Amino acid sequence: MSTEIQSPRSGNNSGQNGSRITGSGKIAPKYRRGAGSKGNFEMFAWLFMRLSGVLLVVLIFGHLFVNLMVGEGIHGIDFGFVAGKWADPFWQFWDLAMLWLAMLHGTNGVRTIINDYAEKDATRFWLKVVLYAATIVIVVLGTLVIFTFNPCPVVNGAQLAGGFCPA
């Protein structure tokens, strides 16, 4: 006695035993790539995840080493430390690369999860709209903070208090 168990979400048109392969060994028609396929986008997204992941490991461990191990370590991190670090264009671009790569890497991962688990097209669409909007807002605001950061602001002709600003 044998019992056949169909794959979840297989439906009736998915081939023998609920698989994507028909009894003749060919791919069922509903799983074939059509003319309207996404092309190479998914391959490039997969490749981006691998490359950005490796680069993020270097950027993040470099960031942690400089912030936690060099100088006074964790006790030296304050507003003045960040102001001094962001006064150097090298660290501005380092932090910018880390921000952009982390956001794009995370967005691509969440996009994949939405594609895998959101069953309705409308739900998938709106989840992606919220995801992309949040990504754009965070990337734009983070970029603005990095490049417009002024540790010694002047308000009403007087410099705000801060021991690290020149008098």
Image: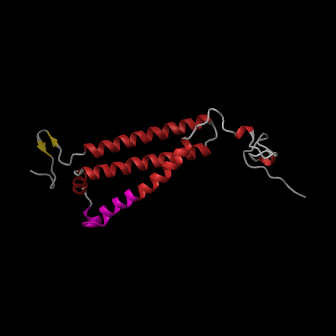
User: As drawn, is 59 to the left or to the right of 154?
Assistant: right
Residue in view at x 33 percent, y 43 percent: 143
Q: Quadrant of the N terminus?
A: bottom right
Residue in view at x 74 percent, y 38 percent: 29
Q: Is residue 53 magenta?
A: no
Quadrant of the rendered image containing residue 81: bottom left
Q: Residue furthest left?
A: 167
Residue in view at x 27 percent, y 52 percent: 90
Quadrant of the rendered image containing residue 28: top right
Pick the residue in front: 122 or 161: 122
Whole-percent x, y for residue 60 in the image? 38, 58
User: As drawn, is 106 to the left or to the right of 9?
Assistant: left
Residue in view at x 52 percent, y 39 percent: 128
Q: Is residue 67 magenta?
A: yes
Q: Residue furthest right?
A: 1
Pick the residue in front: 129 or 41: 41
Q: Is residue 58 visible?
A: yes
Whole-percent x, y for residue 25 in the image? 78, 47
- In this picture the colour scheme is secondary structure
Quadrant of the rendered image containing residue 120: top right
Whole-percent x, y for residue 135 in the image? 43, 42
Q: Main secondary structure of the magenta part?
A: helix
Above/below status of 28 relative to 73: above
- For the image shown, how many numbered marks are present on the structure? 0
Q: Residue furthest top?
A: 35
The residue range painted magenta reads 58-76
User: As drawn, is 14 to the left or to the right of 165?
Assistant: right
Q: Is residue 110 visible?
A: no
